Image (tube, rainbow, N blue to C red):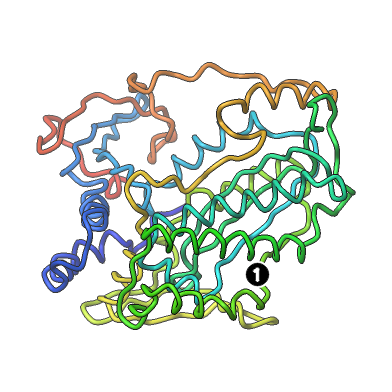
Amino acid sequence: MPRPKLEVADIFRTHGPAYRRANVGSLNLAQLRVMSAIEACRTEALGGHVAACTKCNHRHIAYNSCKNRHCPKCQGPAARDWMAARSEDLLPVEYFHLVFTLPAEIARIAYWNKRAMYGLLFKVSAETVTTIAADPKRLGARVGMTSVLHTWGSAMTHHPHVHMIVPGGGLSPDGTRWIACRPGFFLPVRVVSRLFRRLFIKGLMALHHTGQLAFFGDLNSLEDAEAFASYLAPLRKTEWVVYAKPPFGGPEAVLAYLSRYTHRVAISNHRLVSADAKTVAFRWKDYRIKRGDRMKVMRLSTDEFIRRYLIHVLPDGFHRIRHYGFLASAQRRINIAKIRTLLGAQTAAQEDTPSAEIVPLTLREPCPECGGPMRIIETFRRGEAPRSRAPPRKQAA
Protein backbone atom coordinates (compact mmCIF):
# COMPACT_ATOMS: atom_id res chain seq x y z
CA MET A 1 0.00 0.00 0.00
CA PRO A 2 1.50 3.39 -0.98
CA ARG A 3 2.44 5.82 1.75
CA PRO A 4 -0.40 8.30 2.38
CA LYS A 5 0.31 11.92 1.53
CA LEU A 6 -0.96 13.07 4.93
CA GLU A 7 -0.40 11.36 8.28
CA VAL A 8 -1.47 11.87 11.87
CA ALA A 9 2.23 12.41 12.60
CA ASP A 10 2.26 15.42 10.24
CA ILE A 11 -0.66 16.99 12.13
CA PHE A 12 0.95 16.32 15.51
CA ARG A 13 4.36 17.68 14.43
CA THR A 14 2.88 20.85 12.98
CA HIS A 15 0.12 21.62 15.46
CA GLY A 16 0.94 19.46 18.50
CA PRO A 17 3.23 21.96 20.29
CA ALA A 18 0.57 24.69 20.21
CA TYR A 19 -2.08 22.22 21.35
CA ARG A 20 0.05 21.14 24.31
CA ARG A 21 0.67 24.76 25.33
CA ALA A 22 -3.05 25.54 25.14
CA ASN A 23 -3.98 22.46 27.20
CA VAL A 24 -1.36 22.47 29.95
CA GLY A 25 -2.72 20.50 32.89
CA SER A 26 -5.48 18.88 30.81
CA LEU A 27 -3.39 16.16 29.17
CA ASN A 28 -2.25 13.14 31.14
CA LEU A 29 1.22 11.63 30.92
CA ALA A 30 0.07 8.76 28.67
CA GLN A 31 -1.41 11.19 26.14
CA LEU A 32 1.74 13.32 26.13
CA ARG A 33 3.89 10.22 25.56
CA VAL A 34 1.69 9.12 22.65
CA MET A 35 2.02 12.52 20.99
CA SER A 36 5.80 12.49 21.41
CA ALA A 37 6.09 8.93 20.09
CA ILE A 38 3.99 9.61 16.99
CA GLU A 39 5.87 12.82 16.25
CA ALA A 40 9.24 11.03 16.49
CA CYS A 41 8.16 7.86 14.66
CA ARG A 42 10.39 7.02 11.69
CA THR A 43 12.48 10.16 12.03
CA GLU A 44 16.15 10.68 12.85
CA ALA A 45 15.11 11.21 16.48
CA LEU A 46 14.79 7.41 16.95
CA GLY A 47 17.88 6.31 15.00
CA GLY A 48 17.73 3.70 12.27
CA HIS A 49 19.78 1.91 9.65
CA VAL A 50 21.18 2.29 6.16
CA ALA A 51 20.17 -0.40 3.66
CA ALA A 52 21.87 -1.19 0.35
CA CYS A 53 20.71 -3.33 -2.56
CA THR A 54 22.91 -6.33 -3.35
CA LYS A 55 22.14 -6.05 -7.08
CA CYS A 56 22.19 -2.34 -7.90
CA ASN A 57 23.70 0.75 -6.28
CA HIS A 58 20.50 1.84 -4.55
CA ARG A 59 20.80 2.88 -0.89
CA HIS A 60 18.42 4.49 1.54
CA ILE A 61 18.05 5.37 5.21
CA ALA A 62 15.22 3.76 7.18
CA TYR A 63 14.44 5.34 10.53
CA ASN A 64 13.18 3.31 13.48
CA SER A 65 9.49 3.20 14.35
CA CYS A 66 8.15 4.22 17.76
CA LYS A 67 6.24 0.92 18.22
CA ASN A 68 3.60 2.76 20.23
CA ARG A 69 0.27 0.91 20.18
CA HIS A 70 -1.58 4.14 19.37
CA CYS A 71 0.58 5.02 16.36
CA PRO A 72 -1.12 4.42 12.98
CA LYS A 73 2.17 3.58 11.25
CA CYS A 74 3.25 0.92 13.75
CA GLN A 75 0.20 -1.36 13.78
CA GLY A 76 0.84 -3.32 10.56
CA PRO A 77 3.93 -5.24 11.76
CA ALA A 78 2.42 -5.68 15.24
CA ALA A 79 -0.76 -7.13 13.74
CA ARG A 80 1.18 -9.53 11.50
CA ASP A 81 3.23 -10.84 14.42
CA TRP A 82 0.16 -11.24 16.60
CA MET A 83 -1.79 -13.01 13.86
CA ALA A 84 1.08 -15.43 13.19
CA ALA A 85 1.01 -16.44 16.85
CA ARG A 86 -2.80 -16.77 16.91
CA SER A 87 -2.91 -19.03 13.84
CA GLU A 88 -1.87 -21.87 16.13
CA ASP A 89 -5.10 -21.43 18.13
CA LEU A 90 -7.55 -21.82 15.24
CA LEU A 91 -9.92 -24.78 15.39
CA PRO A 92 -11.81 -26.49 12.51
CA VAL A 93 -15.19 -25.25 13.77
CA GLU A 94 -17.62 -22.41 13.15
CA TYR A 95 -16.68 -19.06 14.66
CA PHE A 96 -19.06 -16.34 15.83
CA HIS A 97 -18.64 -12.60 16.31
CA LEU A 98 -20.35 -10.76 19.18
CA VAL A 99 -20.20 -7.02 19.88
CA PHE A 100 -20.97 -5.62 23.35
CA THR A 101 -21.66 -1.86 23.38
CA LEU A 102 -22.11 0.44 26.37
CA PRO A 103 -25.21 2.68 26.34
CA ALA A 104 -24.44 6.38 25.88
CA GLU A 105 -25.36 7.15 29.50
CA ILE A 106 -22.82 4.58 30.73
CA ALA A 107 -20.20 5.67 28.19
CA ARG A 108 -20.33 9.17 29.71
CA ILE A 109 -19.18 7.70 33.03
CA ALA A 110 -16.56 5.58 31.27
CA TYR A 111 -15.08 8.70 29.67
CA TRP A 112 -13.70 9.75 33.07
CA ASN A 113 -13.09 6.25 34.42
CA LYS A 114 -11.40 4.41 31.59
CA ARG A 115 -9.37 1.82 33.49
CA ALA A 116 -12.21 0.77 35.80
CA MET A 117 -14.99 0.86 33.21
CA TYR A 118 -13.12 -0.73 30.32
CA GLY A 119 -11.94 -3.45 32.67
CA LEU A 120 -15.53 -4.03 33.77
CA LEU A 121 -16.67 -4.19 30.14
CA PHE A 122 -14.11 -6.92 29.41
CA LYS A 123 -14.95 -8.87 32.57
CA VAL A 124 -18.74 -8.71 32.27
CA SER A 125 -18.94 -9.49 28.54
CA ALA A 126 -16.76 -12.59 29.05
CA GLU A 127 -18.70 -13.64 32.17
CA THR A 128 -21.99 -13.23 30.28
CA VAL A 129 -21.02 -15.57 27.45
CA THR A 130 -19.31 -18.03 29.78
CA THR A 131 -22.34 -18.23 32.10
CA ILE A 132 -24.95 -18.72 29.38
CA ALA A 133 -22.82 -21.21 27.43
CA ALA A 134 -22.29 -23.28 30.59
CA ASP A 135 -26.05 -23.58 31.14
CA PRO A 136 -27.11 -27.15 30.20
CA LYS A 137 -30.28 -25.69 28.67
CA ARG A 138 -28.15 -23.68 26.21
CA LEU A 139 -24.84 -25.34 25.38
CA GLY A 140 -23.60 -26.91 28.60
CA ALA A 141 -19.95 -26.33 27.75
CA ARG A 142 -16.89 -24.32 28.73
CA VAL A 143 -16.21 -21.96 25.84
CA GLY A 144 -13.23 -19.81 24.90
CA MET A 145 -13.11 -16.31 23.44
CA THR A 146 -10.83 -13.54 22.24
CA SER A 147 -12.00 -10.02 23.09
CA VAL A 148 -10.77 -6.77 21.53
CA LEU A 149 -11.60 -3.33 22.94
CA HIS A 150 -12.42 -0.43 20.63
CA THR A 151 -13.29 2.96 22.13
CA TRP A 152 -14.17 4.92 18.99
CA GLY A 153 -16.80 5.28 16.33
CA SER A 154 -16.01 6.12 12.71
CA ALA A 155 -16.12 9.86 13.54
CA MET A 156 -13.58 9.33 16.36
CA THR A 157 -16.21 9.98 19.03
CA HIS A 158 -16.14 8.08 22.33
CA HIS A 159 -17.95 4.80 21.68
CA PRO A 160 -16.58 1.99 23.88
CA HIS A 161 -17.40 -1.55 22.76
CA VAL A 162 -15.85 -5.00 22.77
CA HIS A 163 -15.54 -7.27 19.74
CA MET A 164 -15.58 -10.92 20.77
CA ILE A 165 -14.64 -13.87 18.56
CA VAL A 166 -15.94 -17.21 19.89
CA PRO A 167 -15.51 -20.76 18.54
CA GLY A 168 -18.89 -22.41 18.06
CA GLY A 169 -18.73 -24.90 20.88
CA GLY A 170 -16.83 -25.83 23.99
CA LEU A 171 -15.47 -28.51 26.26
CA SER A 172 -17.84 -30.63 28.29
CA PRO A 173 -17.71 -30.03 32.08
CA ASP A 174 -15.51 -33.11 32.54
CA GLY A 175 -13.28 -32.08 29.63
CA THR A 176 -13.73 -35.34 27.71
CA ARG A 177 -15.98 -34.18 24.85
CA TRP A 178 -16.32 -31.30 22.41
CA ILE A 179 -19.88 -29.98 22.44
CA ALA A 180 -20.71 -28.14 19.21
CA CYS A 181 -23.41 -25.49 18.98
CA ARG A 182 -26.22 -25.73 16.47
CA PRO A 183 -25.05 -24.88 12.92
CA GLY A 184 -25.30 -21.15 12.35
CA PHE A 185 -26.49 -20.42 15.90
CA PHE A 186 -24.41 -19.75 19.01
CA LEU A 187 -26.46 -18.23 21.85
CA PRO A 188 -29.78 -16.30 21.95
CA VAL A 189 -28.91 -12.61 21.65
CA ARG A 190 -31.74 -11.34 23.86
CA VAL A 191 -30.69 -13.63 26.71
CA VAL A 192 -27.07 -12.49 26.27
CA SER A 193 -28.11 -8.81 26.21
CA ARG A 194 -30.17 -8.99 29.38
CA LEU A 195 -27.58 -10.87 31.41
CA PHE A 196 -24.93 -8.44 30.18
CA ARG A 197 -27.10 -5.54 31.35
CA ARG A 198 -27.71 -7.06 34.78
CA LEU A 199 -24.08 -8.02 35.41
CA PHE A 200 -22.71 -4.69 34.21
CA ILE A 201 -25.04 -2.60 36.37
CA LYS A 202 -24.21 -4.84 39.33
CA GLY A 203 -20.49 -4.34 38.72
CA LEU A 204 -20.95 -0.62 38.21
CA MET A 205 -22.78 -0.30 41.53
CA ALA A 206 -19.91 -2.15 43.21
CA LEU A 207 -17.36 0.26 41.70
CA HIS A 208 -19.39 3.18 43.00
CA HIS A 209 -19.79 1.64 46.44
CA THR A 210 -16.02 1.15 46.78
CA GLY A 211 -15.23 4.69 45.63
CA GLN A 212 -13.54 3.68 42.36
CA LEU A 213 -15.48 6.10 40.15
CA ALA A 214 -14.87 9.82 39.63
CA PHE A 215 -17.45 12.31 38.35
CA PHE A 216 -16.98 15.70 36.73
CA GLY A 217 -19.07 18.50 35.25
CA ASP A 218 -22.77 17.79 35.03
CA LEU A 219 -22.17 14.28 36.40
CA ASN A 220 -20.86 15.61 39.74
CA SER A 221 -24.13 14.84 41.51
CA LEU A 222 -23.66 11.12 40.80
CA GLU A 223 -21.18 10.90 43.65
CA ASP A 224 -24.26 10.56 45.86
CA ALA A 225 -25.38 6.93 46.08
CA GLU A 226 -29.10 7.71 45.71
CA ALA A 227 -28.51 10.00 42.73
CA PHE A 228 -26.36 7.33 41.11
CA ALA A 229 -29.03 4.67 41.63
CA SER A 230 -31.65 6.97 40.13
CA TYR A 231 -29.42 7.64 37.12
CA LEU A 232 -29.09 3.90 36.47
CA ALA A 233 -32.76 3.04 37.10
CA PRO A 234 -34.01 3.67 33.53
CA LEU A 235 -31.08 1.68 32.13
CA ARG A 236 -32.28 -1.44 33.95
CA LYS A 237 -35.31 -1.51 31.64
CA THR A 238 -33.85 -0.50 28.28
CA GLU A 239 -32.46 -3.01 25.81
CA TRP A 240 -28.66 -2.98 25.71
CA VAL A 241 -27.04 -3.50 22.34
CA VAL A 242 -25.39 -6.88 21.85
CA TYR A 243 -24.84 -7.61 18.19
CA ALA A 244 -24.28 -11.15 16.90
CA LYS A 245 -22.87 -11.49 13.41
CA PRO A 246 -23.29 -14.63 11.28
CA PRO A 247 -20.58 -17.29 11.48
CA PHE A 248 -17.37 -16.84 9.53
CA GLY A 249 -16.56 -18.82 6.42
CA GLY A 250 -13.80 -20.76 8.18
CA PRO A 251 -10.65 -20.37 10.27
CA GLU A 252 -8.88 -18.43 7.50
CA ALA A 253 -11.73 -15.92 7.43
CA VAL A 254 -11.39 -15.53 11.20
CA LEU A 255 -7.72 -14.62 10.83
CA ALA A 256 -8.49 -12.15 8.05
CA TYR A 257 -11.18 -10.55 10.18
CA LEU A 258 -9.05 -10.35 13.30
CA SER A 259 -6.23 -8.74 11.33
CA ARG A 260 -8.57 -5.82 10.61
CA TYR A 261 -9.65 -5.35 14.21
CA THR A 262 -6.93 -6.29 16.70
CA HIS A 263 -4.46 -3.48 16.10
CA ARG A 264 -6.64 -0.64 14.88
CA VAL A 265 -6.28 2.89 16.19
CA ALA A 266 -8.87 5.67 16.26
CA ILE A 267 -8.17 6.65 12.63
CA SER A 268 -5.84 5.34 9.94
CA ASN A 269 -3.64 7.66 7.91
CA HIS A 270 -5.41 6.60 4.72
CA ARG A 271 -8.66 8.18 5.90
CA LEU A 272 -7.11 11.64 6.19
CA VAL A 273 -8.04 14.08 3.40
CA SER A 274 -6.48 17.44 4.32
CA ALA A 275 -5.18 19.46 7.25
CA ASP A 276 -4.17 23.04 8.00
CA ALA A 277 -3.94 25.31 11.02
CA LYS A 278 -7.73 25.57 11.25
CA THR A 279 -9.28 22.28 10.12
CA VAL A 280 -8.66 18.59 9.51
CA ALA A 281 -10.81 16.69 7.02
CA PHE A 282 -11.17 12.92 7.02
CA ARG A 283 -13.39 10.20 5.58
CA TRP A 284 -15.88 8.49 7.88
CA LYS A 285 -18.73 6.01 7.55
CA ASP A 286 -22.22 7.14 8.55
CA TYR A 287 -23.92 4.00 9.85
CA ARG A 288 -27.25 5.81 10.09
CA ILE A 289 -27.53 5.46 6.31
CA LYS A 290 -29.00 2.03 5.65
CA ARG A 291 -28.68 2.06 1.86
CA GLY A 292 -26.34 3.69 -0.59
CA ASP A 293 -22.94 5.25 -0.02
CA ARG A 294 -22.19 5.67 3.68
CA MET A 295 -18.81 7.34 3.20
CA LYS A 296 -18.69 11.06 3.97
CA VAL A 297 -16.04 13.68 4.67
CA MET A 298 -16.02 15.29 8.12
CA ARG A 299 -14.23 18.53 8.92
CA LEU A 300 -13.16 19.29 12.48
CA SER A 301 -11.13 22.09 13.94
CA THR A 302 -7.51 20.99 14.22
CA ASP A 303 -7.67 21.18 18.03
CA GLU A 304 -10.85 19.09 18.09
CA PHE A 305 -9.27 16.47 15.83
CA ILE A 306 -6.29 16.16 18.19
CA ARG A 307 -8.61 16.06 21.21
CA ARG A 308 -10.69 13.25 19.72
CA TYR A 309 -7.58 11.27 18.84
CA LEU A 310 -6.20 11.55 22.37
CA ILE A 311 -9.38 10.50 24.19
CA HIS A 312 -8.73 7.00 22.86
CA VAL A 313 -5.32 6.68 24.50
CA LEU A 314 -5.61 3.75 26.90
CA PRO A 315 -4.26 3.84 30.46
CA ASP A 316 -0.69 2.62 30.84
CA GLY A 317 -0.46 -1.17 31.09
CA PHE A 318 -4.09 -1.72 30.05
CA HIS A 319 -4.44 -4.73 27.72
CA ARG A 320 -6.83 -4.12 24.83
CA ILE A 321 -6.78 -7.76 23.63
CA ARG A 322 -7.74 -10.45 26.16
CA HIS A 323 -8.46 -14.18 26.09
CA TYR A 324 -10.93 -16.07 28.27
CA GLY A 325 -12.18 -19.59 28.94
CA PHE A 326 -10.19 -22.35 27.30
CA LEU A 327 -8.25 -19.68 25.37
CA ALA A 328 -6.92 -18.06 28.55
CA SER A 329 -3.14 -17.90 28.38
CA ALA A 330 -2.37 -20.16 31.32
CA GLN A 331 -3.84 -23.35 29.79
CA ARG A 332 -4.35 -22.27 26.19
CA ARG A 333 -1.88 -24.63 24.48
CA ILE A 334 -2.98 -27.62 26.53
CA ASN A 335 -6.66 -26.92 25.85
CA ILE A 336 -6.14 -26.35 22.11
CA ALA A 337 -4.19 -29.62 21.79
CA LYS A 338 -6.93 -31.50 23.69
CA ILE A 339 -9.70 -30.01 21.54
CA ARG A 340 -7.85 -30.82 18.31
CA THR A 341 -7.54 -34.42 19.49
CA LEU A 342 -11.25 -34.59 20.31
CA LEU A 343 -12.09 -33.15 16.88
CA GLY A 344 -9.65 -35.46 15.11
CA ALA A 345 -7.75 -32.47 13.75
CA GLN A 346 -4.04 -32.28 13.14
CA THR A 347 -2.07 -30.21 15.62
CA ALA A 348 -0.76 -27.02 14.07
CA ALA A 349 2.98 -27.13 13.43
CA GLN A 350 4.96 -24.72 15.56
CA GLU A 351 7.85 -22.85 14.01
CA ASP A 352 10.85 -21.70 15.92
CA THR A 353 10.58 -18.00 16.67
CA PRO A 354 13.76 -16.07 15.95
CA SER A 355 15.27 -14.16 18.82
CA ALA A 356 14.02 -10.60 19.00
CA GLU A 357 17.55 -9.45 19.87
CA ILE A 358 18.98 -10.52 16.50
CA VAL A 359 18.52 -7.95 13.73
CA PRO A 360 18.42 -9.73 10.34
CA LEU A 361 20.94 -8.38 7.84
CA THR A 362 18.67 -9.10 4.86
CA LEU A 363 15.44 -7.11 4.97
CA ARG A 364 11.97 -8.37 4.12
CA GLU A 365 11.24 -5.51 1.71
CA PRO A 366 12.97 -5.74 -1.70
CA CYS A 367 14.86 -2.94 -3.41
CA PRO A 368 12.42 -0.27 -4.69
CA GLU A 369 14.55 0.18 -7.82
CA CYS A 370 15.28 -3.35 -9.07
CA GLY A 371 13.51 -5.69 -6.66
CA GLY A 372 16.76 -7.19 -5.39
CA PRO A 373 17.52 -8.10 -1.75
CA MET A 374 18.25 -5.19 0.60
CA ARG A 375 20.89 -5.62 3.31
CA ILE A 376 21.65 -3.51 6.36
CA ILE A 377 25.12 -1.99 6.03
CA GLU A 378 25.00 0.40 8.99
CA THR A 379 22.93 1.11 12.10
CA PHE A 380 22.87 4.32 14.10
CA ARG A 381 21.36 5.25 17.46
CA ARG A 382 19.06 8.04 18.59
CA GLY A 383 20.55 11.43 17.93
CA GLU A 384 23.31 10.03 15.75
CA ALA A 385 23.81 10.73 12.06
CA PRO A 386 24.62 7.85 9.67
CA ARG A 387 28.13 7.76 8.26
CA SER A 388 26.90 6.45 4.90
CA ARG A 389 25.44 8.96 2.47
CA ALA A 390 21.91 8.02 1.38
CA PRO A 391 18.48 9.65 1.10
CA PRO A 392 15.64 8.77 3.50
CA ARG A 393 13.64 5.74 2.42
CA LYS A 394 10.45 7.63 1.53
CA GLN A 395 12.41 9.84 -0.87
CA ALA A 396 14.50 7.05 -2.37
CA ALA A 397 11.80 5.08 -4.14
Say which residue appears at 86% left-offset and 40% top-offset.
180
How many numbered dots are placed on residues in this image? 1
Name the one closer to the observer, 165 or 359. 165
Q: Residue at x 26, y 66 (%)?
A: 11
Q: Nearer the viewer, residue 388 or 284?
A: 284
* Direction front: furthest residue: 226
- Residue 346 relative to residue 278: left or right: right
Q: Is residue 11 left or right of residue 160?
A: left
Vertical placement of 63 versus 221: above or below? above
Give the residue type that dot 1 points to: Val
Residue 100 visible, this orientation: yes
Q: Secondary structure at mark 1?
A: loop
The percent coordinates of residue 49 (x first, y second) are 24, 32
Q: Quadrant of residue 32?
A: bottom left
Graded by Cα atoms within 10 Å as few (under 14), some (14 to 19) or many (20 or more), the crowding at tag 1 reads: some
The x and y percentages for residue 18 are 13, 70
Q: Position of residue 77 (x, y in %)?
A: 44, 40
Q: Which residue is mark 1?
A: 241
Residue drawn where x is 34% and y is 72% of the image: 215
Question: What residue lies at 29% left-to-right and 45% top-to-bottom?
Answer: 396
Q: Residue furthest top?
A: 352
Q: Where is residue 228 shown, x and y percent of the image?
A: 45, 75
The answer to which of 121 and 279 lies nearer the viewer is: 121
Decide: is 88 above or below 36.
above
Residue 267 in sight: no
Q: Closer to the camera, 370 or 233? A: 233
Q: Quadrant of residue 176?
A: top right
Q: Is residue 49 left or right of residue 364?
A: left
> Taking 230 as reference, is 383 above or below it?
above
* Left or right: where 82 falls relative to 362: right
